[in-house]
Amino acid sequence: MKLDKVIAVRTTKTIYRDGDIAVKVFNEDFKKSDILNEALNHARVEETGLSVPSLREVCMIDGKWAIVTDFIAGKTLAALMEENPDKMTEYLNLFVDLQLSVHAKKSPLLSKLKDKMNMKISQSNLDATTRYDLHTRLESLPTHDKVCHGDFNPSNIIISSDGTPFILDWSHATQGNASADAARTYLLFCLAGKVETAESYLKLFCKKSDTAKQYVQKWIPIVAASQLVKGKPEEKALLMHWVDVVDYE
């Protein structure tokens, strides 16, 4: 493999292109179990028939673990939204339709969303009273088994040169409640400072999925608490605001 063309650089990984493949190389200190879990999630989602780049292999390159997939030539939906603000309504409709196509699938071997949320709440630095409240709220919400992306945002969607959308990055995939997945997407828009887009997204998701807005909002404190575990100082104030909201109705 030739790793001389960098596609993207993240805190814990670098993504390269080598011809028709994309190579995601993780830092040495990245947990092996998390890398293998991401590859397994990807394989399981690929088996549902969703439009994702094909997984080629998991390997080691110069002592670092790597995940190799097909390279998809195109632009992210995020880039298209920035370049063509006049088409935002069209892009948001596509975005929500893609998310609903994910939620229409099932993959019984994926980790359970509620288990992951409970773990994240326990790992947070929130006080015991708040953690108890969040655990109780989580248990009171319905348990579903829909495929959930866990980080569904426009930068994780590539529109290929022929117009086909591909969904990337399945490291956070679980099976669970679609409204939790929508709550996270809403929160990601807010954290990016795109509050107006967040509101438009939530309205459209609720309309297309026939879901009450209040129901999605019940998940927001839980999702915000799970996001706190990432420890990003710039996000803390907004996330604590969402965690502290007692009732949305």
Image: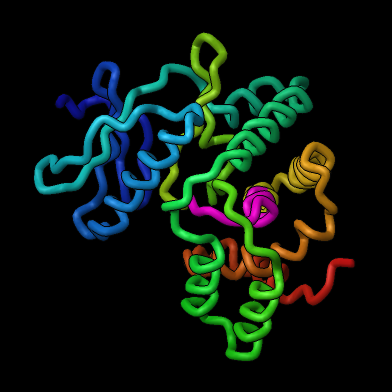
Q: Residue at x 84, y 59 (%)?
A: 214
Q: Residue at x 16, y 40 (%)?
A: 59
Outermost residue, right side: 249
Does the magenta portion include 201? no
Asked whether 201 or 141 is in front, the reply is 141
Residue 137 visible here: yes
Q: Give the vertical position of 63 relative to 242 (above or below).
A: above
Residue 184 visible here: no
Q: Residue at x 62, y 39 (%)?
A: 104
Outermost residue, bottom side: 129
Q: Give the vertical position of 2 relative to 127 (above or below).
A: above
- Report which quarter residue 113 is drawn in: bottom right
- 199 left or right of 70? right
Q: Quadrant of the C terminus?
A: bottom right
Q: Give the vertical position of 66 relative to 236 (above or below).
A: above
- Report which quarter residue 9 is drawn in: top left
Helix, strand or loop for the magenta stretch, by majority: helix
Q: Position of residue 185 (x, y in %)?
A: 64, 48
Q: Quadrant of the N terminus?
A: top left
Q: Give the vertical position of 225 relative to 149 (above or below).
A: below
Asked whether 125 or 235 is in front, the reply is 125
Q: Residue at x 39, y 46 (%)?
A: 41
For the image, the number of numbered tags is 0
Q: How is the image coloured?
A: rainbow
- Report which quarter residue 88 is drawn in: top right
Outermost residue, top side: 162
- 10 left or right of 96? left
Q: Position of residue 139 (x, y in %)?
A: 65, 75
Q: Position of residue 182 (x, y in %)?
A: 68, 49
Asked whether 107 or 79 is in front, the reply is 107
Task: Provide the residue span drawn in magenta.
Answer: 173-185
